[in-house]
Amino acid sequence: MKPNEQPEVIAIGETMVLITPTVAEPLETAELFRLETGGAESNVAVHLSALGHHAAWASHLGADAFGRRVERQLRERGVDTSLVNFSTDAPTGFYFKDPGNGVIYHRAGSAASAMTPDDLATVPFEQAAITHISGITPSLSAGCSALIDSVLDRAALSNTVVSFDVNYRAGLWPIAEAAPTLLALAQRANIVLVGLDEAEVLWGTTTPEAVRALLSNPEILVIKDGDIGATEFNADGQVFVPAHKVDVVEAVGAGDAFAAGYLSGYLTGLSAEQRLSLGHDRAALVLTSTSDLPTL
């Protein structure tokens, strides 16, 4: 990327240190581990960078060894980290991936969870073609919830396209709060990505058509149905593309990879079928690895 070049995509949200076994076995018995980065929005930025896009990530990290490591690893993967701030008042969050058993978070009180709208005052995301956010951020704190509202308010006055991945995390907030909040945020975005399973948990919708009937405002709605496939709803109707058949090692992070592939297709003017297929291509890379970010 050229110095001072405006990013095509600016992704906003928390990234943590990811501690994962080097082979796909439970934490209880694993002996060897590796340190990586893990964050829904920065994962999208990494995959977009690998696909040739100028992608930036905006967030806060602790001014500690973990924070410096996260920033360096993302920068080395091609992500523009010029919009990252280091906090001396709070640490970098981290989490463990426990193959077969999900993840274990240690993110309470992290630097990113302390973000507020003021922290984005000088971030020029309105000038990006796409601003990517997720439903994880508003669950972290009242300040982070206000930050996402501010992003949507500012974006509405600009030409940036807001991409919103619902990314419901049951362990972060109660469904009674999450369901209406995520629905309201999704209705304000231009592109919305949501899993059919999480839509059913959140809103009781059991088919892609039912989700679209509920989420009528977004110009584009992409509904992912695991290993079955993904459906895009747009002004011209709907398109379904089946998922690739792969031997799944670990599913965590595949949704972020899919989002990046899809957004890359959107940025390059591909058809609905082509961008959904590109989303499946990127997801397959993660599904066959214990890492959120395999060698790209």
Image (cartoon, rainbow, N blue to C red):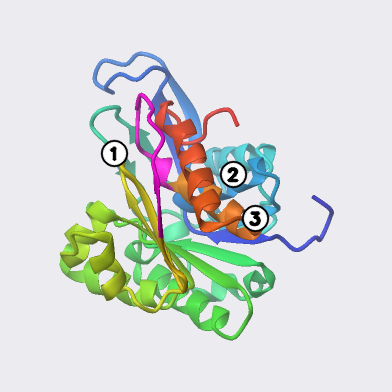
Ranked by sequence position, the earlier of labels 3 and 1 is 3
Ranked by sequence position, the earlier of labels 2 and 1 is 2
Expressed as whole percent of the image width and height from the top left, the position of residue 79 reads: 66, 47
Q: Would you name the residue on which mark 2 appears?
A: 46
Which element type, helix, strand or loop, lies under badge 3? Answer: strand
Q: What residue type is labelled 3?
A: Ala
Q: Tell me how many marks there are.
A: 3
Looking at the image, do the residues carrying marks 2 and 1 touch, with CB atoms under 8 Å apart?
A: no
Residue farthest to the right?
A: 2
Q: Which amino acid does label 1 sit on?
A: Ile
Q: In which quarter of the image is residue 284?
A: top left
Q: Would you name the residue on which mark 3 appears?
A: 56
Q: Residue at x 75, y 63 (%)?
A: 6
Q: Can residue 86 be seen in this view?
A: no
Q: What residue type is labelled 2?
A: Val
Disc number for residue 104: 1
Expressed as whole percent of the image width and height from the top left, the position of residue 260 reads: 53, 49
Boundaries of the magenta span: 239-255
Q: Residue at x 32, y 63 (%)?
A: 139
Q: Residue at x 28, y 61 (%)?
A: 208
Distance Cα–Cα, label 2 vs label 3: 9 Å
Assess disc 3: are there few (<14), some (14-19) or many (≥20) residues with their C-alpha within 10 Å of its C-alpha: many
Closer to the camera: disc 2 or disc 1?
A: 2
Which element type, helix, strand or loop, lies under badge 2? Answer: helix
Up the image or down, 97 lies above or below 60; here it is above
Q: Does the magenta stretch include residue 241?
A: yes
Q: Quadrant of residue 247?
A: top left
Q: Is residue 251 left or right of residue 207?
A: right
Expressed as whole percent of the image width and height from the top left, the position of residue 131 reads: 57, 66
Q: In which quarter of the image is the C terminus?
A: top right
